C-alpha cells in the first residue's frame, strides 16, 4: 500500500462500522468480549457502548516488538490529545476497545480478534499483545471504541526462529525534535518497502518546564499528531528504546543533569512520570510496563538465520558522566576505569551471551550513542564526548575484545544521538589505525534535530582515520537491506525536515561484505557541497 493511501485512511478516520462487525462475526465477538474483560475491571465498570462526540483515534495506530507468532498493537483514545490535564479529553471511565487482525486490508479474512480495556490510569492507551499468528506474514489491524473505528495499520511478524531468511529490509531513526509539526523524513520512510523500523532514542524532547505526567503525555501527544509519523507507525512494526531527552538531557541512572539540580528522589519521580508516558504512547509489551522509576527495555529479536538484534538501554543503568563538556572535553583520567558502565553488569552479560550463542549471519547491536572513539582535539591532546562510549572505555573494550576472541558472525553497531551521519570502523586499538577492524558502526542522523558541532568534528577528522564518513548538515534516517552475502546502508536525507514537501534522496550508500568487517562506499549523491566523505 502506498503512502498516499495511508494518509487517506488516516484522514478519513472513520471506517464502516457494519463491515467491522460483520467481518468479525457478531456472536464470536460478543463471546470474546465477555471472556477478556478482567473481573477487577468489570467490577469497577467498563463502558462498552460509549458514544464519542469527537473522534478518539487522533494519534493513529501502531504495532511493535514483532515475534514469529505475534506483535503488540497500540492506540490511545484522545479526542483532545493535548488537553492541559494530560488525559486527552477523555472522561474518567474505563473504555472497552475491540481490535481485529486480518490477512487483507479489506478485512475479509479476519484471523484474530479481541478486547482490551483502555484505562484512565494509563491515559486510555491500549497495548494488545496478539499471539498465534503465522511467522513472516503481513497482517492488517484496526480498533473500535464505542461508535468509532480507527485507521487501518499494517504489520509483519518475524520469521520462525532458525528459519532460512533470504533478505531483510529495515530502517533506523532517532532524535525527532518537534519542527513545524511535520517530519518529511518519515514521509519518505512510509513509502519504503520495510519489514520493521528501529527507533534508537529521543522520540520526544523534554521542555524546560516538563515536570509532570501530564506534561510528558502532552509532549508525546503533540509529536504523535504528525501525519507523517503516524503513517510510518501505521505502515511498519517499530522496535523502540529511549535515550535521554524522553526524560531529561544527559540523565544517568538516578542522577539529574547538571549535577545537584535535583535530588535523586525528585529525579526518580520525574523519571517515573516520563517512563509511564513513554509506555503509554508506544507499542511496547507488558514486560516493558514501568514499575515506578524502573522499566525493562533491553531485549533481543531474532530474524531467522539472517540477523540477531540486541536492543540496549544505555541510560537507566549507567554511571554518571565524568564531564559535561560539549561537544568534547579533555579526556578524564577515570574514563578507562573498569568499574564504569553504560549498561550495568547484568545487561552487559546478557549482551555478550547473545553474541556468543547467536547462529545468525549478522549480529546487530542497536543502541543510542556513538561507540567508536572520537578525539575532538586535532592537536596533541585528547578531547572526547564523555556522554558517549568514550566516557566508558573499559566496557567498550570488553565488548570489542569479546568480539575479537569469540568471533560472532558479522557484528554491526547501530547508533543515533549525535544528529549527524557517520560510518565508523570499530578497531581493536583506536590508537593504531593499522589494528584489526572488528565491526562496523552505522550512525544515523536525526529525523529533525539540529547539529551545531559540524565544525568541531570536521576539524578533527584527520586525527580519527577510522571514521570513514561524516555529514552533519542533513536530516533523515538509514535504510538497511541485508542478505547473507552483504549488508547495505542507504543514508536517506532531506534538505528541510520541517518542509512537508521536501524530497528525500540517498546521500551515500555503504556496504559490508559477509566476513569482511569494515564498510565500503558504493554510491554517493551529487549533493557533495554538503556531504563530507573521508577516504
Image: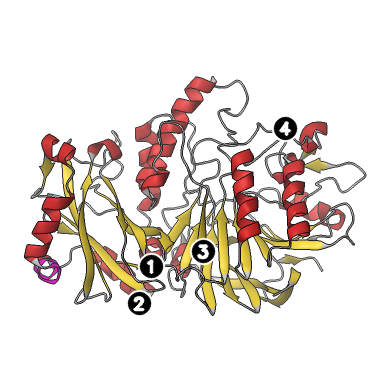
| Label 4: how many Cα within 10 Å (few below 14, some 14–19, many 20+) | some
| Label 2: how many Cα within 10 Å (few below 14, some 14–19, many 20+) | few
Q: Circle 2 is placed at which residue position?
A: 1
Q: Circle 4 is placed at which residue position?
A: 323
The magenta stretch spans residue 273: no
Q: CB of mark 4 within 8 Å of CB of mark 2?
A: no
Please tell me the numbered disc located at residue 235: 1
| Label 1: how many Cα within 10 Å (few below 14, some 14–19, many 20+) | many
| Label 3: how many Cα within 10 Å (few below 14, some 14–19, many 20+) | many
State which quarter of the image contains the N terminus: bottom left
Which percent across, then down, holds residue 332? 80, 33
Q: Circle 3 is placed at which residue position?
A: 302
Q: Residue at the location (73% across, 33% down)?
A: 339
Q: Residue at the location (55% across, 40% down)?
A: 244
Between 352 and 277, the one nearer to me in the picture: 352
Instruction: Look at the image and give the residue range highlighted in magenta.
Output: 18-24
Q: CB of mark 4 within 8 Å of CB of mark 3?
A: no
| Comes first in the chain, label 4 or label 2 | 2
The picture quadrant where one finds residue 42 is: top left
| Comes first in the chain, label 3 or label 1 | 1
Amino acid at each position: 500500500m502506498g503512502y498516499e493511501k495511508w494518509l487517506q485512511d488516516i484522514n478519513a478516520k472513520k471506517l464502516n462500522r457494519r463491515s467491522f462487525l460483520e467481518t468479525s462475526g457478531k456472536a464470536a465477538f460478543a463471546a470474546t468480549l465477555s471472556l477478556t474483560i478482567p473481573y477487577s475491571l468489570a467490577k469497577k465498570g467498563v463502558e462498552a457502548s460509549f458514544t464519542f462526540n469527537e473522534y478518539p483515534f487522533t494519534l493513529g495506530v501502531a504495532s511493535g516488538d514483532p515475534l514469529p507468532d505475534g506483535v503488540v498493537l497500540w492506540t490511545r483514545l484522545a479526542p483532545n490529545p493535548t488537553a492541559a490535564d494530560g488525559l486527552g479529553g477523555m472522561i474518567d471511565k474505563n473504555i472497552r476497545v475491540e481490535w481485529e487482525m486480518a490477512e487483507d486490508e479489506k478485512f475479509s479474512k479476519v484471523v484474530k480478534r479481541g478486547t482490551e480495556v483502555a484505562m484512565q490510569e494509563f491515559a486510555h492507551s491500549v497495548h494488545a499483545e496478539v499471539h498465534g499468528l503465522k511467522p513472516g506474514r503481513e497482517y492488517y489491524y484496526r480498533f473500535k471504541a464505542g461508535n468509532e473505528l480507527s485507521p487501518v495499520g499494517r504489520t509483519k511478524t518475524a520469521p520462525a526462529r532458525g528459519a532460512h531468511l533470504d533478505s531483510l529490509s529495515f530502517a533506523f531513526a532517532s532524535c525527532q525534535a518537534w519542527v513545524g509539526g511535520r517530519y518529511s523524513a518519515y514521509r519518505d520512510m512510509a513509502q519504503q518497502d520495510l519489514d520493521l523500523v528501529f527507533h534508537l532514542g529521543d522520540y520526544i524532547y523534554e521542555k524546560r518546564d516538563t515536570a509532570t505526567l501530564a506534561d510528558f503525555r502532552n509532549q508525546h501527544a503533540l509529536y504523535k499528531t504528525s501525519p507523517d509519523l503516524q503513517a510510518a507507525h501505521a505502515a511498519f512494526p517499530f522496535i523502540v528504546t529511549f535515550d535521554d531527552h524522553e526524560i531529561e538531557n544527559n540523565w544517568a541512572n538516578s542522577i539529574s543533569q547538571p549535577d545537584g539540580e535535583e535530588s535523586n528522589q525528585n529525579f526518580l519521580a520525574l523519571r517515573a512520570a516520563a517512563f509511564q508516558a513513554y509506555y503509554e504512547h508506544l507499542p511496547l509489551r507488558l514486560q516493558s510496563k514501568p514499575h515506578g522509576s524502573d522499566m525493562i527495555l533491553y531485549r533481543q529479536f531474532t530474524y531467522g538465520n539472517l540477523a540477531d538484534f540486541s536492543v540496549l538501554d544505555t541510560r537507566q543503568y549507567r554511571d554518571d558522566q565524568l564531564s559535561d563538556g560539549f561537544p568534547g572535553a579533555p579526556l578524564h583520567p577515570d574514563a578507562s576505569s573498569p568499574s564504569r558502565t553504560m549498561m550495568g553488569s547484568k545487561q552487559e552479560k546478557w549482551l555478550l551471551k547473545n553474541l556468543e550463542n547467536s547462529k545468525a549471519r549478522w549480529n546487530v547491536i542497536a543502541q543510542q550513542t556513538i561507540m567508536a572513539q572520537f578525539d575532538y582535539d586535532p592537536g596533541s591532546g585528547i578531547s572526547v564526548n564523555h556522554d558517549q562510549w568514550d566516557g566508558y572505555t573499559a566496557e567498550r573494550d570488553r565488548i570489542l575484545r569479546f568480539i575479537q576472541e569469540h568471533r560472532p558472525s558479522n557484528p554491526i553497531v547501530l547508533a543515533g544521538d549525535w544528529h549527524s551521519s557517520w560510518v565508523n570502523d570499530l578497531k581493536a586499538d583506536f590508537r593504531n589505525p593499522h589494528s584489526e577492524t572488528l565491526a562496523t558502526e552505522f550512525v544515523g542522523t536525526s529525523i529533525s534535530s539540529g547539529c551545531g558541532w559540524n565544525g568541531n568534528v570536521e576539524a578533527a577528522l584527520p586525527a580519527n582515520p577510522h571514521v570513514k564518513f561524516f555529514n552533519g548538515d542533513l536530516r533523515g534516517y538509514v535504510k538497511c537491506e541485508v542478505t547473507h552475502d552483504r549488508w547495505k546502508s542507504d543514508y536517506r536525507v532531506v534538505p528541510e525536515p520541517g518542509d512537508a514537501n521536501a524530497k528525500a534522496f540517498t546521500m551515500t550508500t555503504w556496504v559490508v561484505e559477509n566476513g569482511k568487517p569494515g564498510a565500503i562506499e558504493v554510491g554517493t549523491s551529487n549533493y557533495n557541497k554538503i556531504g563530507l566523505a573521508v577516504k
